[in-house]
Structure formats: C-alpha cells, structure tokens
Amino acid sequence: MLLSDKNVIIYGGSGAIGGAVAQAFIHEGAKVFLVGRTLAKLERIAEEITAAKGKVEIAQVDALDVQSVEQHANAVVEKGGSIDIALNAVGVTHIQGTPLAELSLEDYEYPVQVYTRTNFITSKVVARHMVKKQSGVILMLSTPASQMPGPGFMGHSVACAGVEAMSRHLAGELGASGIRVNCIRSHMIPEAARQGSHSRVCFGQVAERAGITLEEMLTGAAGGTLLKRLPTLADVANTAVYLASDYANAMTGTIANLTCGVTLD
C-alpha cells in the first residue's frame, strides 16, 4: 500500500472531492481524519466509507478559523503521533458568470478571501507539526480558471491563481524541512457538478446566463479539451494518492494538470 500508516487530514471532507480522495487514501492504507463545517454531511460520507469496509474519523472543523483548525490538528497529533499529509478541498458557493460591469466588489472578493485564507490557515497549522518530523505533504486544489481568460469568473480566477502561487511559495519555504507542497489543477468534474452543492450552483449560474442546461455546458466543456472529456473524481483521487506517496518524492512546487488539455504547461 502506498500510504500505509500515514495520518491524513482532509479539510472540506464533506464535499465530492474530499470524500473521493478519502476513500482512495484509505484504500492505500492511510488513516484519514475527515473534517468539515457540516457534521451531517460528514456523517453521510463516513457511512459510505464504512459501507465500503473503510474506516475514517470525522470532526466538525471550520477551516476558516485558526483556533478550530489548531485544536483539531493538535488532537490528531496527540492521538496519531503525526500529521503526514494534508489536503485542502474546501469549497464555497460563489458568483460565476457575471461580467465585470455587473460584478460587485463583495462578490469579486469573496472567493479570493475564502480560498486563500483557508489554504493559508491549514497549511500553517499542519506545517508546524510536519517541521518537527522533517517530513510531510501538503496538497491544494485549483482549476484552469487560474490561467484562462474570462469573461465571468474574475473572483474565481484570482482565487485559483492565488492558491497556485501559494503552493509554489510554500514549496520554496518548506522544502528544506522535508515538506513537499503540490497543487492539483482540475477542470470541472461532472460528478461533482451534478452532486456537489457548491459546484452545481456555481456552474448552474454560468449555464443559465448562457441559456443552456448544465448538461449542455458539461458536454461543451468536454468538447473543448484535447482529450474530449472531463476529469473524473477518480482521476483527482488517484493523482492525490500519487502526489502524497513516496513515488512523488522528488515532486514539489508542482501544479498537476488534470484539465484534460484545456490548459497546457
């Protein structure tokens, strides 16, 4: 198993991506601590994992609050001895599809503030524990909006670009302490768009303004990639496993491109 005896915290664990990555990590032998703001959603994910004969520990944690994240991280270390891997998969509903002339300052700022704030907080907290062991892996998520021109997703674009910049900066700062930091850039994921509340609302806004259905938008997005498809939850989860494993020991400061070719590096 690639992640045997590794202690993992997944922030935003009640979402579609967090849940999929949790199951993949557990399959590879990791002990997963799944956290999020909504306990009922976490319990539902935990039931699915248990039904698949996996084990996970859940906790209600606000990943935008320093004290909440610190208390949980300290409890994980007290119980498990270490934090070996951390993934921030936090997602929030925000405005997309609105052009600059109609976009309020508040709607622009919201995703920028949330995504950069939560990744800063969780990275800082877990890094403090990882430095003591001189090892660890921090993973972040972004989308091709970090590189694509608009219109209609300025706040999301700046937020994703900020997360990617943060991952590169932290790779440089934490590398000497044996900590690797990488980011997964995934295009829209159909399963998450259909099931996940945040993705469904955000993409739905764009589709509605364009006068098409969500399914039509997903089909069009797939056709716009080099592979003529969109990434799956399994694609993201398997990539996260690889980046967290010793197979990726020489990889840090990397943006793993899972856009199916809509952006090229």
Image (cartoon, rainbow, N blue to C red):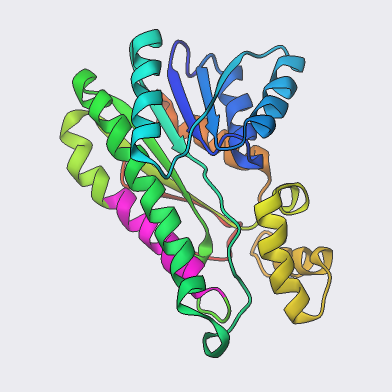
Q: Position of residue 16 (x, y in %)?
A: 66, 41
Image point (33%, 49%), residue name: 167
Q: Nearer the viewer, residue 113 or 192?
A: 113
Q: Nearer the viewer, residue 66 or 17?
A: 66
Residue sticking out furthest to the left: 176
The quarter of the rendered structure image containing the C terminus is bottom left
Q: Position of residue 171 (x, y in %)?
A: 26, 43
In the image, residue 177 sits, relative to residue 251, either above or below, namely above
Residue 251 in sight from this viewpoint = no
Image point (41%, 24%), residue name: 72
Magenta stretch contains residue 84: no
In the rendered image, which quarter is residue 8 located in? top left
In the rendered image, which quarter is residue 78 located in? top left
In the image, residue 128 sits, relative to residue 7, either above or below, namely below
Image point (15%, 34%), residue name: 176
In the image, residue 111 sits, relative to residue 189, either above or below, namely below
Q: Is residue 103 left or right of residue 252?
A: right
Q: Is residue 149 left or right of residue 16?
A: left
In the rendered image, which quarter is residue 28 located in? top right
Q: Nearer the viewer, residue 219 or 251?
A: 219
Magenta segment boundaries in residue numbering: 153-168
Image point (51%, 72%), residue name: 107
Residue 164 in sight from this viewpoint = yes
Magenta stretch, main secondary structure, is helix
Q: Is residue 224 left or right of residue 34?
A: right
Q: Position of residue 152 (x, y in %)?
A: 58, 78
Magenta stretch contains residue 160: yes
